[in-house]
Image (spheres, coloured by chain):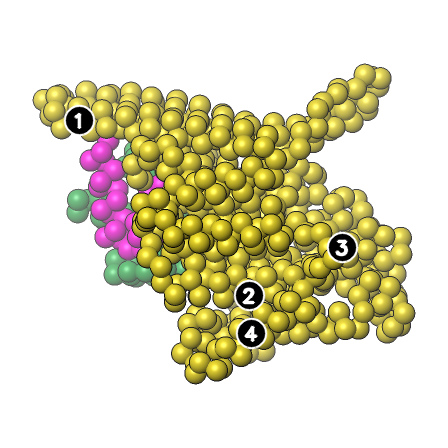
Chain colours: A yellow, B green
Amino acid sequence: MLFTSYGFLLFLAVVLILYYGLPRRFQWPLLLIASYVFYGASGIGNLCYILATTLATGLLACKMQDVSDAQSKWLKGKGKEASREERKAYKQRMKKKRWRLLLLCLAVDVGMLAVVKYTGFAVSNLNVLIKALGSGRQLTFFDIALPMGISFYVFQAVGYGIDVYRGKYRAEENLFRFALFVSFFPQLIQGPISRFDQLSPSLFAPHKFQTRTISLGLQRVLWGFFKKLVVADRLIGAVGMLTKDTQTYEGCWVVVGMFLYAVELYADFTGGIDITIGIAQAMGITVQENFIRPYFSKSVKEYWNRWHISMGSWFTDYIFYPVSVCKPMLDLSSFSRKHLGEQAGRRAPVYASCFLVWAATGIWHGAGWNFLVWGLSNCAVLLVSQELEPLYRNFHERFQVAGTFGWRLFGVARTCFILCCLRTFDCYRDVPLTFRMLGSVLTSWNWGELFSPGRILELGLSWADYGVVLLGILLMLGVSLWQRKGSVRGQIAQKPYWVRFALWLSLFFMVIVWGSYGIGYEASQFIYNQF
Amino acid sequence: MEELREGLLEILEEMHPDTDMASCKGLVQDKILDSFDIITLITRIREAFDVVVPADRIVPENFNSLDALTKLVDRLLEEE
């Protein structure tokens, strides 16, 4: 059931009516049932995966909590009489117990994700290797359909397990409540990847019917639908044509594809998250923001702090820092500093951790070499810009341009361009082809074709479509600029009634009139659903 | 505690000789310490005090000032 399908709108209306119609103590159980109905609609078999994740993580986290509680009890009781060494040894033993439980939890969750998402990729690569070694035998495998949103809810559950292991918060004893945390339907299929301590207070609290909250939530849903249906879905065909028919669309068309894909991806993913946050808000539930005007970033590093924030912070908290400060990495740092100098010691653990994090980020997006190369390219750009930092400093000391509008604009344009280039690995889904297509921008000098109306219209978009996309871009840009002064919906709410009414009604009709739906329309997947 | 503070100050000053490490209250917030520095700092703390800062304690509040860092390392030594 996709957010943009008629079935989902009906489902949402029923859920909202029941949510506020039933006694408040039934609100979260209703959401749990609704979430399982929602997920079950994508395939009954998919429920097995989410149930396995929920049961394994929920039960093992409770066991970890039992171990922690036993430790606290001992330290407050018998432990007081024990020597410092005895207490230390006891704590080590208990930590080891919790560690084993966490490892089991990770083995189930990550193992399941690895099997369904990466077996096909691993086997096909092994087959290539076997063939290269001269053997005629080939491995066979069952291609398992990837359950929708599995990468998101598995990461959410794994984060919870690690937090309980670290003692950041207590494990949730009610397995049904934990099941809702894992399966909460608005964020189930494309995130954000929430943290239990952030989401649970509002998720399980009873919520009164409040017109303001509901209307603010639904306004954000409408804005999300505008981005998805009017802008993103309008561009799907053109982007698909540009990236599939690589013989015809070389040279300047690669640049056009890069630009259109940047617009499509932004409208699709941020639109989807607007719908998610808006639905949650209409129910009084606070879901964390996943974007802060990412295309206004002046560096790639800044961009990754503003785009898909929940994923970035997940990788930082659960992979980057743990790997950076693990014993072998600290040994590597000490060794490098002693034998290769201060700078090498400083760089070694961070470089190694960055490499690992970005390889994981790439492969998280999809089982393919293109995603791995995409991740590692991001890593390379980040590390090179880190290395060039002294050069930038010298430049800015000599030329006082840093704060000027022109320089900021240049920073934004440069960042957008670099990211567009990196995203081509995602567009073409084939590493050698991506390099060939990027190379063709320099070798096939065919910019004149852009001024041929016939060629432009071949992409399946009429002039009216281009006009609507341009209007959509301007609106998204305007809203982003407006956001810098605070919540746009909050500011609109201060306007006179007729202005608010006219604004929201116009947006509603834009979705109705220009949205890509109607007879013969099949709701399109959100791009991030497939990850 | 005073000895610990002095030891940490020495490490921080070695890493950033131009910054007044004793009084600065926004080492992470003001981007004086980046991720490279944080990891280097943790390595040096391990070498000097034989204590490892676990990943879940790597939050800006623990690294923003010399005082916060001293409290963190002191707590970790206490927990040992």
SS at badge 3: loop
Q: Amino acid at mark 3?
A: Gly
Q: Position of residue A451 (x, y in %)?
A: 86, 74
* Highlighted magenta segment, given as a residue range: B56-80
User: Extreme front residue here?
Assistant: A21
**What subunit carries mark 2?**
A
Tags 4 and 2 in contact by the CB under 8 Å rule?
no
Is A61 on the left-hand or right-hand side of A366?
left
Q: Amino acid at mark 4?
A: Leu
Is the residue marked by circle 1 packed among few (<14), some (14-19), or many (20+) residues within 10 Å? few
- Residue drawn at (26%, 28%) of the image: A68
In front: mark 1 or mark 3? 3
Sequence-earlier tag: 1 or 3: 1
Question: Residue A316 versus residue A476: which sits nearer the camera?
Answer: A476
Tags 3 and 4 in contact by the CB under 8 Å rule?
no
For the residues marked 2 and 1, what is the alpha-carbon distance in whole angstroms? Answer: 52 Å
Disc 4 marks which residue? A505
Q: Quadrant of residue A457?
A: bottom right
Are discs 1 and 3 both within one chain?
yes
Disc 2 marks which residue? A223
Question: Residue A113 versus residue A34: which sits nearer the camera?
Answer: A34
Q: Residue A73, labelled with which disc?
A: 1
In front: mark 2 or mark 3? 3
